[in-house]
Image (tube, rainbow, N blue to C red):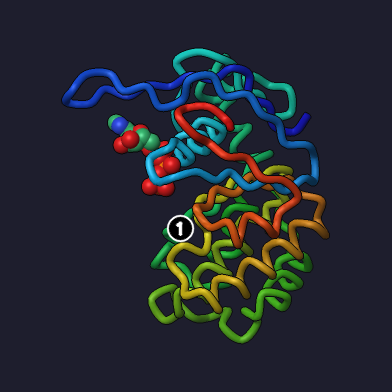
Amino acid sequence: MLLQLHDVEKAYDSGAGRVSVLRGVSMAVAAGETVALTGESGSGKSTVLHLCAGLDLPDSGRIEVEGQDIAAADDRARAALRRDAVGLVFQQFNLIPSLDVAANLAFQARLAGRQDAPWVADLARRLGLADLMDRYPEQLSGGQQQRVAIGRTLAARPRLILADEPTGNLDEETGDAVLDLMLGLVAEAGVGLLLVTHSPRLAARLDRRLLLKGGRLA
Ligand SMILES: Nc1ncnc2c1ncn2[C@@H]1O[C@H](COP(=O)(O)OP(=O)(O)OP(=O)(O)O)[C@@H](O)[C@H]1O
């Protein structure tokens, strides 16, 4: 299994004491499958994604990426897993301001040791970025920046993409166009996708939908 959560629990300390956010979440994403994680604001969607990315650790339960328990892995192994298997796409585009589009696109693939110039050129063309390669992030629209962020993630050939409201900063029309491009490329590359969204309309576009409610999957 590409991604598997077993009875994951997570609580945070708040001013009023400890607040339990996830109360036993179990789920799986198969290779090449696209899954939407939905739920009300504050239901813990981003928390699930951060745990899956190894950016934070569960209080109990297990999270496995390609069979490897990311909580049991040391920092080095966790970083390697994140670099080699997992790609992240956030609502904030997180491009590197001092690098042009071409260098931003190539950045993660280079870190992962998987440079592939023809693949990057193909992605740039498919994402409509071919004429923007020497621009800097501040010279791009929001939709263009998110297309670069998606291209940068796909360029490194992850097996799993974790996306948190990837079109949340874009107007509906631009967001739909960006999502179309992302889903098309994800399907073609056989990448698994776990996408957090509060939008039932976007969630309907994916293979499967999960609803987080009261700290559990409904
Ligand atoms: N680092 C943290 N410290 C304390 N509380 C946190 C932390 N991160 C999240 N929380 C709390 O956990 C709960 C779930 O947050 P999370 O961001 O996972 O929800 P979400 O479903 O993604 O919400 P939204 O749709 O509004 O982004 C919220 O009540 C939030 O305040």
Where is residue 16? Give x, y as percent: 18, 23
- Left or right: residue 4 versus residue 53 is right
If the image is split into quadrants, where does the N terminus sit? top right
User: Toward the viewer: 75 or 55?
Assistant: 55
For the point 56% across and 14% down, the residue is 61
**Residue ranking furthest to the bottom:** 131
Q: Residue at x 53, y 52 (%)?
A: 197
The image quarter containing residue 91 is bottom left
- The x, y position of residue 87, in whole percent, is 61, 47
Query: At 63% across and 44% down in the image, what residue appears?
Result: 194
| Vertical order, 65 against 36 (above or below) | above
Q: Identify which residue is drawn at 65% across, 53% down.
A: 109
Tell me if 89 is positioned left or right of 159 in this view: left
Image location (x, y in percent) of residue 63: 61, 23
* Mark 1 residue's CB less than 8 Å from ligand 1: no
Q: Residue 119's spot in the image, x, y percent?
A: 77, 65
Report the number of discs.
1
Where ligand 1 lies, by image quadrant? top left
User: Which element type, helix, strand or loop, lies under badge 1?
Assistant: loop
Q: Is residue 211 above or below residue 69?
A: below
Count residues near mark 1 (Cα–Cα under 10 Å), then give few for <14, some for 14-19, many for 20+.
some
Residue kind at label 1, given as amino acid type: Gln
Rendered-image quadrant of the C terminus:
top right
Per the image, the residue denoted by label 1 is 91
